[in-house]
Amino acid sequence: MQIGEASKLTGVSRKMIRHYESIGLIPSADRRDSNYRDYGHRDIHRLGFIRRARDLGFSMEEIRDLLRLWGDTQRSSADVKALTEAHITELENKIRLLGEMRDTLANLAQACDGDNRPDCPIIDGLEGKLVDLHAPRRAAN
Amino acid sequence: MQIGEASKLTGVSRKMIRHYESIGLIPSADRRDSNYRDYGHRDIHRLGFIRRARDLGFSMEEIRDLLRLWGDTQRSSADVKALTEAHITELENKIRLLGEMRDTLANLAQACDGDNRPDCPIIDGLEGKLVDLHAPRRAAN
DNA sequence: CTTGACCTTACCATCATGGGAAGGTGCAGA
DNA sequence: TCTGCACCTTCCCATGATGGTAAGGTCAAG
């Protein structure tokens, strides 16, 4: 099949399929006489794997490692699990940072009247007037 | 003061200070005879504002808007609050997406023995063998 | 034979940031 | 005065993942 259909089946854009080929994440596709790329079910399978890994937030480098493990029948599941747990830790760090930002902003916004007057604790906070820009931890959740 | 000291005082790198000038986020700095940029406390104040906004995850465009509101003595705090609340919503969307990824991966990892054998539910999930790649909501946070 | 849908490569853009090269400035010490 | 060093300047390139667009080739249906 052509790249367009492969794209539709896998949810990976034509652009990205060519890109993945160029960086060696997938092997060079077969070519027809027309020079069009030609994909089979094995390629679709690999692209689907990549898309699912992307959807779970793995980076290209992590996906490269996962593909290597996937193709290695001698792999130990411990290796896959370790890679996954490292990624979970990355995700949790990001979540924590974003949560801190949200909490700080929610505190500032809560202190802001939001009326027609210019006085605004949010601006004051950004300006450095408020010392404790970092919000206290929320009680729960 | 020179750009290096301004950088130290504000926590904004030399590179980024020049960049902010080039995109008009801060006014063109004064120049000494040597052509070195020269900063005063007003510049430091503005850079500090920008850094704090960046630390809270605002994009450059949002910061541009915040700076405009900061300099507008006629602003209404409602405008600032609206901008902030929109950003809080963005943050919460990101947090939710990352949390879904984490939950899915935690479920897969929990089902993986992590031993020397190759059998691995994580790989199976990425491969598309498992239908319910999306993890059930966790009971409580 | 034309039309339109598809494909090809090649280049440029995003966003925020950093690296490095090549060269100028300014100050402290021998 | 010369030298070294720390700092500054501009300019170009890179990241990661993705999209846009342009200029052109291929192919099937009408």
Image (cartoon, coloured by chain):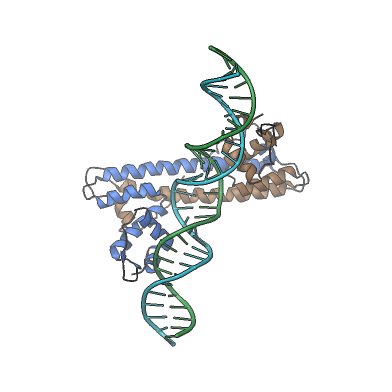
Chain colours: A blue, B brown, C green, D cyan
Q: Quadrant of residue B40?
A: top right
Q: In percent of the image, x 44 and y 44: which residue is there?
A: A91
Quick check: D18 left or right of A112?
Answer: left
Where's residue B108, x and y in %?
34, 49
Q: In percent of the image, x 57 and y 38: which residue is there?
A: B15
Where's residue D15, x and y in %?
45, 46
Pick the residue in front: A3 or C10.
Answer: C10
The answer to whether one can see residue A13 in this image is no
Q: Is residue A91 above or below residue A44?
A: above
Where's residue A104, x and y in %?
59, 39
Q: Considering the image in quadrants, where does the N terminus of chain B appear? A: top right
Q: Quadrant of residue D24?
A: bottom left
Quick check: C24 left or right of B100?
Answer: right
Quick check: B72 left or right of A99?
Answer: right
Q: Quadrant of residue B30?
A: top right
Pick the residue in front: A10 or D21.
Answer: D21
Q: Is residue A76 above or below residue D26?
A: above
Where's residue B4, x and y in %?
60, 30
